[in-house]
Amino acid sequence: MANINPGAAQTTTNHPIQLSSNQAIRLIASAQSVNLNSVGDTLAQILVAGRVSVAYVLLTNASISLTTAQIAVYTLPAAGGTGVLTATSLSGATTAAKVINSAASSTDAITGLNLYVRNTTAQGAAATADVFIYGYDLTFLP
């Protein structure tokens, strides 16, 4: 019987596209159903093992029209470490379909395992949204 090679194996990852370059913008971290009605942190685990630089933060899927809520992103809890994104108004998120795109305040290299999405101003009513953090993977590729 002939030895038949069925082809390359396929792998499913958290990122929908296999990237052959670390110079492409990619999903760095995300947080689902962030509570926007109380000041506090939501953990967003970094998906890349190594060094990253955040380029921008997206917020979408708002459960209600956001009028007062604000978020920021930090490298440590309780607004500690590097402020990746300073407090940003979410007032443009009037429906779940709206997307707020905010440029990072700091593009310093980050080597930790987590980012923290901090709700800095409470909405005043039950509200949630999803946050996606995009940037560059600075890990060396052979």
Image (cartoon, rainbow, N blue to C red):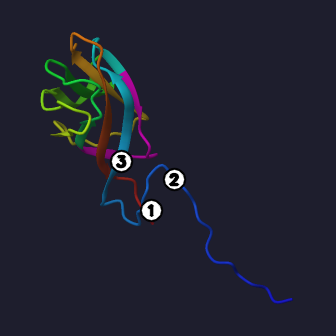
Q: Earlier in the sequence, mark 1 or mark 3?
A: 1
Residue at (29%, 46%) from the top-left corner?
A: 134
Relative height, residue 40 to residue 93 (above, below): above
Label 1 to label 2: alpha-carbon separation? 8 Å
Quarter of the image holding residue 29? top left
Give the magenta part as a residue range.
Answer: 42-55
Residue 53 shows in the view = yes
Residue at (31%, 15%) from the top-left corner?
A: 40
Is residue 45 rendered magenta in the image? Answer: yes
SS at mark 1 in the image: loop
SS at mark 2 in the image: loop
Position of residue 42 measured from the top left corner of the image (x, y, whole percent): 37, 23
Q: Earlier in the sequence, mark 2 or mark 3?
A: 2
Residues under numbered marks 1 and 3 in contact, where contact means CB atoms less than 8 Å apart: no
How many other residues sit within 10 Å of disc 2, few (<14), some (14-19) or many (≥20)?
few
Relative height, residue 70 to residue 51 (above, below): above
Nearest the eye: 77 or 59? 59
How many other residues sit within 10 Å of disc 3, few (<14), some (14-19) or many (≥20)?
many
| Residue type at the position of mark 1 | Gln
Q: Which residue is mark 2?
A: 13
| Residue type at the position of mark 3 | Leu
Q: Which residue is mark 1?
A: 18
Q: Give the left or right position of residue 51, taking residue 6 as reference.
A: left
Q: Which residue is mark 3?
A: 27
Q: Give the left or right position of residue 77, taking residue 93 as reference.
A: right
